[in-house]
Each structure stands twice: as structure tokens, then as C-alpha cells.
Image (cartoon, rainbow, N blue to C red):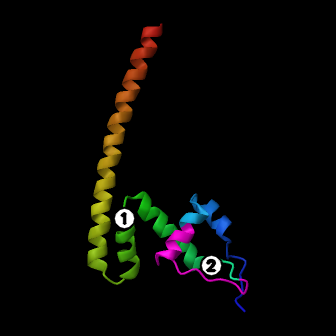
Amino acid sequence: MKVITETSLSISEMAEQFDISAYTLRYYEKIGLLNVPRNDHQIRYYPDDVCQTVNAIVNYRKAGLTIAEIHHILDNPDHDAELIQTLLDTKATLQKQVADLENTLSFLETKIVYHRNRLK
């Protein structure tokens, strides 16, 4: 019998915690990104180590990595030099996106001020 600890979460709790759907969690399991244990009734439960993996997957996806890239990262945790380069490249891409968004926000702020002044 598999014991569900107090720190184990159900699929709905996981979905809520990470703001993803239960379908997405099942998909990640189906394609081999997650190895989710089940209880005696075949109900999935998510212990801490699986929660940490889901957290990594969600953050890698937000950073723009593909499923294939994430799969490679999770399957090759000891390829440090390669992983560092992938993460540095991703970080540089995100920094460029942040800078672009800051420029867009500045433009929008300028336009807001302009149109507010026209209303006076």
C-alpha cells in the first residue's frame, strides 16, 4: 500500500497551485516528463519531489523552453555545461523581452499622458 503523506497533493490541488489544468498534468505524465505515483485505487498523488519537478516544468515553459528542451534537461541533469548554456541563452532571450516590454510600457505611458493632457 502506498502511503499518501500530508505533503502529497491531489491532481486538482496541483493544478490550482501551479495555475495549470489537470489535463496538462496528465499530458506531462503521458509524455514522460512526470512519473506520478498512484494509490491503491489508481488515484494520482503528487509528493514533494514531483511538485518540485512540476515547478521546474512550469517555470521552464514560462521561460519559453519547448517540451523537447525540458525533456532533455530533466533526462540529463548531469550535463551541467550544456544545461548552463541553455539556461544562459534562455535568460538572455528573456532579458531582451523584458527590455522590449519596458520600452512598450514607456511608449504607452507617454500616450496616456498625451491624451490626458488633451482632455484638460
Evaluate whether residue 51 shows in this view: yes
- Give the foreground label among 2 and 1: 1
Q: How many labels were placed on the picture? A: 2
Sort mark 1 into few (<14), some (14-19) or many (20+) by Cα contacts within 10 Å: few
Front one among 31 and 80: 31
> Residue 33 colored magenta?
yes
- Provide residue 94's location: percent of width, then percent of height: 34, 53
Q: Residue furthest top?
A: 120
In three-dimensional space, the C-alpha distance between marks 2 and 1, rounded to whole angstroms, equals 25 Å
Q: Residue furthest bottom?
A: 1
Tag 1 residue: 66
| Mark with earlier residue (2, 1) | 2
For residue 1, which quarter of the picture? Answer: bottom right
Front one among 29 and 118: 29
- Provide residue 61's location: percent of width, then percent of height: 43, 61
Determine whether the residue tagged by mark 1 lies in a helix, strand or loop: loop
For residue 86, which quarter of the picture? Answer: bottom left
Tag 2 residue: 47
Give the main secondary structure of the magenta stretch. Answer: loop
Measuring 41% from the left and 78% from the top, which residue is drawn there? Answer: 74
- Provide residue 19's location: percent of width, then percent of height: 58, 57
In magenta, the rendered stretch is 25-41
**Residue type at the position of mark 2:** Pro
Mark 2 and mark 1 in contact? Answer it, CB < 8 Å: no
Look at the picture and state if 15 lies above or below 101: below
**Residue type at the position of mark 1:** Thr
Q: Which mark is residue 34?
A: none
Look at the picture and state if 40 lies above or below 56: below
Sort mark 2 into few (<14), some (14-19) or many (20+) by Cα contacts within 10 Å: some
Measuring 56% from the left and 68% from the top, which residue is drawn there? Answer: 25
Determine whether the residue tagged by mark 2 lies in a helix, strand or loop: loop
User: In the image, is 47 to the left or to the right of 105?
Assistant: right
